[in-house]
Image (tube, grey):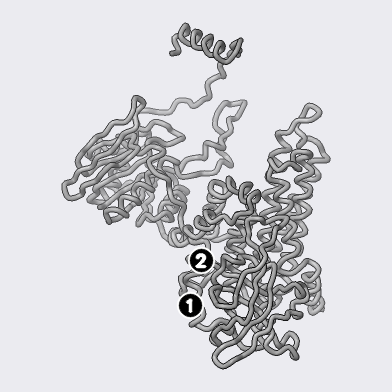
Amino acid sequence: MNIVVCIKQVPDTSEVKIDPVTNTLIREGVPSIVNPFDSYAIEEALRTKEKFGGKVVAISMGPPQAKDALKEALAMGADEAYLLSDRAFAGSDTWATSYALAQAIRTIGDVDLIFCGRQAIDGDTGQVGPGIAYRLGVTQLTYVIKVREIDPANKRIVVERLLEEGREVVSGTLPALVTVVKGINEPRYPTFLGIRRAARAEIPVWDAAKVNADENKIGLKGSPTQVWKIFTPPRRGGQVQLMPGSTDEAAAALADKLLAEKVI
Amino acid sequence: MYPLTEEQRMLRDMVRDLAQKVIAPRAAEVDETGEYPWDIKEALARQELLALPFPEEYGGAGADMLTLCLVVEELAKVDASSSLILGIQSLGAIPIMLAGTAAQKARYFPKLAKGEWMPAFALTEPGAGSDAAAIRTKAVRDGDSYVLNGNKHFITNVGLAQVYTVFAMTAPEKGTRGISAFLVEADTPGFSIGKIEHKMGIRGSRTGEVIMQDCRIPAGNLLGNEGEGFKIAMMTLDRSRPEIGAQAVGIAQGALDFAAKYAKERVQFGAPIANLQAIQFMLVDMAMQVDAARLLVYRAARAIDEGDKNISMYSAMAKCFASDVAMRVTTDAVQVLGGYGYMKEYPLERMMRDAKITQIYEGTNQILRLVAARGLLAQY
């Protein structure tokens, strides 16, 4: 099976600090990591290849330093990696990004399965995966917690999607794009030999011309949406009310209050 | 900072992550129970870390000394016992690397690299610690075999290892030149395990006694030539001491990290104690020592990787300095935490107990000062 996995390098937001004066993200000195959901995607791609044979290609759209994220994918076991990087891509929103990545996937050729993380922890939109699926005209399966079965001969895939209301079992035809959620697997640590191979690898950089990207569909020009502002909302003040009495009495009192406030 | 290759950087980051997520949560339990952490050993084997000291042609990763030190330091930051799992791989690999035949390497290296077999280094005896030449274990040639008789103690991996490098007297009248090295497999009749030690620290490491009674091994298990044993032992220690230095640096850094974070959170007299100069001076003295120790360790590692002729001196200095630093830094780190530092609920008392052995094993710091002095004065 020919498998592609789309990854993004993001700032490690577990370490993020907000500038108290401007109320924006402090980006300097924040380490970059592979978007955590994308690690699950890479792992799922590798497991699928281990089961059915084939090849895993990792791609990422980003600045030159995003090569580090692709190297991690290679170290985990991806066979090839390509960096989609070009000045012309700068300022892309999710619509332009999904266009560029879709073009890259077309450039790779015949693809059976595309894995993505459900969302990037910096943008948090969750739109790029579905955007790519739409543009390529492939089956779109999002929020997947488990791939139940794949039948490459009959081009069929069955997955479980994790939704707020519960789990949904969906079957679809290949080729398909799958966005994965945390818990679908436990991403492997790269082995030393994987790291050695990745460190020695040269990652080809694809520019807009290489992937036949229409200049009006990429970058700022190709972005119908723009990020106007990112800010942390002001803290909501609140009060603590302690429920009196024994555990049973307090629980009853709390339940009454929650019902009255229509919380439950 | 210090120039690392991309491979070294990626490996160090992977080990740091593995250490934090997989090993750190187990460290307290391993110390408390004293049970060998098979799960951690398997995790290290899976990531091919146990293959690092072995040559690529025998299934190893052919890593250089600096790489080994980087990995050991990251492991030691969270758990000194776990870092010794890799340290003992080197101590097992180096004698065979230095003096082994192709057949001996082919027999042991692939299994050791995979972690299927574990090695041990059996030099020390009750009557022969720093005075390594005073060993009494004898090896007598008898036809196609050698017959070994004697006891070794304070051996790491005792009872777990499948192959031991054992140093024995083949010619007592020749003193140090009468010592030979042998590869003894654990299932050889006449080879048995004695007492297991209860230690102050590195309690996840198994240490104990080995007893050889008319233990008959094939003559082909002689390592190198008769009379070369002492030289093999000393050359091995020259090449493994930087890893102990790295272990000490890791323990010290782990302690410093914990103490510094604590100092920023602990409020006394209305402010974090990190605002107090007394604490700041302690922390910065700790940091200076750890940095200096790390650079000495890296210098020794580089010297080995480059085939420098002064490696004895550099590795003795690195291990001696780093281990003294580890003891001082962990003691001060406990002090920064005050009463909490003394309680088992916090990892610092364990780090302090773990640090002590680094001043003692692989050459006491007193012996190492002799070794380093020899090298130093030879330069003038």
- Choose top left, top right, bottom left or bottom right for residue B214: bottom right
Crowding around mark 2 (Cα neighbors within 10 Å: few <14, some 14 to 19, many 20+) is many
- Whole-percent x and y of residue A181? 38, 37
The reply to the same-chain question for discs 2 and 1 is yes
Chain ID of residue with mark 1: B
Residue extending farthest to the bottom is B143
Picture residue at 37% right of the left edge, 55% below the top: A204
Element on which disc 1 rests? helix
**Residue B107 numbered mark, or none:** 1
Picture residue at 56% right of the left edge, 41% below the top: A30
Task: Residue B298: tell me if it is visible.
Answer: no
- Choose top left, top right, bottom left or bottom right for residue B235: bottom right
Q: In which quarter of the image is the C terminus of chain A?
A: top left
A111 shown above or below A198: above
Chain ID of residue with mark 2: B
- Whole-percent x and y of residue B351? 70, 50
Of A159 and B290, which appears nearest the observer? A159
Picture residue at 52% right of the left edge, 25% below the top: A231
- The amino acid pointed to by label 2 is Ala
Of B334 and B150, which appears nearest the observer? B150
**Residue matched to label 2:** B51
Left or right: where does residue B358 sit relative to residue B110? right
- The amino acid pointed to by label 1 is Arg
Distance from disc 2 to disc 1, alpha carbons, whole Å, reads 15 Å
Element on which disc 2 rests? loop
